Amino acid sequence: MALFEKRYTNKVLLDDTERLTSVIENARTIDGHTEYVIKTQRGPLPERSWRVSRRYNDFVQLNAALSISGFDLPLPPKRIIGNMEPDFIAQRQIALQNYLNIVLMNPILASSLPMKKFLDPENYTAPLHEIALQQVSLALRSDANFEVCKPIPDMGWRLRKHYYTVKNRQNPKQELLLAWVEFGPDKHLQDKDIQGVFKTLGSLRHTYIEPIVHQHVTDNGALTIRNFYAAGTLRDVLCITKPKQPFIKKYGNPKQIKSLTVQEIATYGYQILEALGYLHEKGLPYGHLHTGNVLLTPRCAKLLDIENGLIGLPAFYRPYVVQRRKLHATTQVDVYSFGHVLYEMAFGRPLLEATCSDLPHCEANLKNLLEVILSPEALKQDLPTVMQLLQHPFFESARRAALAIGNVEKPYFKLSSHLKEALQEAVNKAEQRLRDEQKVVRHQKRLVKVQEMMSSEEEMKKRKHKLRKEQKLAQEQRSSSQLGTNGTKQINGKSPERSDSPTSTSTATSVGTLTPPSLRSVEITQANAVPGKGVPPPPPSLPPPCEASGGASNSVSKSSNDRAALLGSICNFDKNRLRRITNGHR
């Protein structure tokens, strides 16, 4: 017993609504079979992650458990021959990753117990049903009026909430429904205070709130007994299903759905707002409005599970709420959840996103009301209050009908000043945890954006660096090819030859040196120039001849002086002083 209680208490702080993301990191062969290593992360923080190994047969068993939802999930087929080949294992890993992504994108499948056990066996392998039955038996052993008949497995979406049919010994024909749930992570009331609040909840009376027949609080959770209605909740009516069936079978992929008429939406919506307004007026935190917590009776709609906020349970729409920084107060969460309820009543299917920017066709006032609550622009500001929504034109007919009928039952709920203060303090702590989670989500989004920007900048730098290297290499290749061409260039149609001696009479220069053009060639160029085009400038004058050496005498003949002047001109020739001349014949 002590062991059960210890394990039971350790699981209280776990928020089952936090989103799980999984990545198959690799595959490994162990003892002749393949195991896939899956890294799973809870919430936005990377440090809250772990790894599990799963075989293909584990995926097959998971798919069999999820098949009652009616979804056609893309599990890759089984293969007997060649299933150990590396290429096949790599392809199967990709297919299994796609399978996990599709399952985790569906909120109903992702929150199911088989999926939680598959990804997080450490926190979900405990026998939750047996522990719940034990707690229920202990809670009712001192009450002789109620007898537990049989469990209703997986009736609701909460993994730690369990339902049983109960018989009242004083009225055996009355069908009752018992619900047992553990305390949640936002349970901040002291044990004495929560006992007092639950005792007063039994006396709460309101036309649009389903009363509690019996309530009991233990050290680990709370037990409530209410009347059972065969028609079920609003979600059961929309999905045309029976309320006692498993949750994923009822709501996973219903065969047929229905939407309500505009008049029904206005009537039920107005009654829900009246109940929310009364809870806000009395300071009772709710935050758990969804179509599964709205009961449709022959007379009206009624709210269920108003005790969820007191025992710290996370809300159904919390994964959406943490994405919107303006939804930090419980009253605002109620208004936002009311928008989802309106959407589901109008179109027969739930809104699987945090916002709705493109509404389907509907009545004008209803469309305006949905936009006021669910549009991205509206969620960037403070949402309207419940009292403001009650004055919306869409509820005009329902408001007139309610005034004509009048209050059938006078509302009643009374709390002591001490319990009001304790409730307000608990609400503040729960809202602070929500703000902290919203900050973490925003911080992680900024980090992801920065990483994406940095990775894109690094890729751009790499591409630029690679382009510069290619350009530099191409430029070097062009330069080397030009040098090679200039080195083998023929001058005046003759191959250049190196002179054997400095006194050689050859007019050829060494390889790579241009011969100065003669005056004759310049005259020919000018004569052959095309009319209308600029005539190239004349070549620069030759440098002055070198002075004769000291051994030369004035008696040397004229031909010897001319020869010496020519040799001096050749020795002192500077090609950098020349200008390029274009041949007119080209």
Image (cartoon, grey):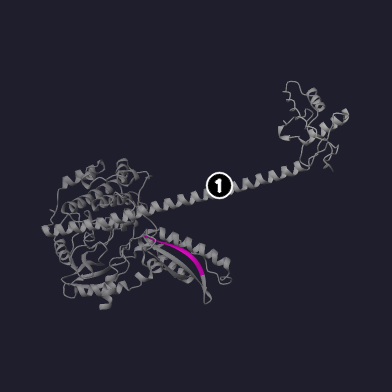
Indicate whether residue 22 is drawn in magenta: yes
Q: Judge whether 175 appears above or below 342 on screen.
A: below
For label 1, count other residues whose C-alpha is less than 10 Å away and answer few (under 14), some (14-19) or many (20+).
few
Of helix, strand and loop, which mostly describes the magenta segment?
strand
Label 1 secondary element? helix
Name which quarter of the figure residue 364 lies in. top left
For the record, the magenta segment spans 19-27
Residue 123 % position (x, y): 34, 69
- Give the quarter of the figure containing the C terminus: top right
Which residue occupies the foreground of this view, 196 or 212? 196
**Where is mark 1, residue-wise?**
464
**Residue at x 54% of width, y 65% of height:** 90
Which residue occupies the foreground of this view, 422 or 362? 422
Q: Residue furthest bottom?
A: 1
**Residue at x 27% of width, y 49% of height:** 264
**Figure disc tally:** 1
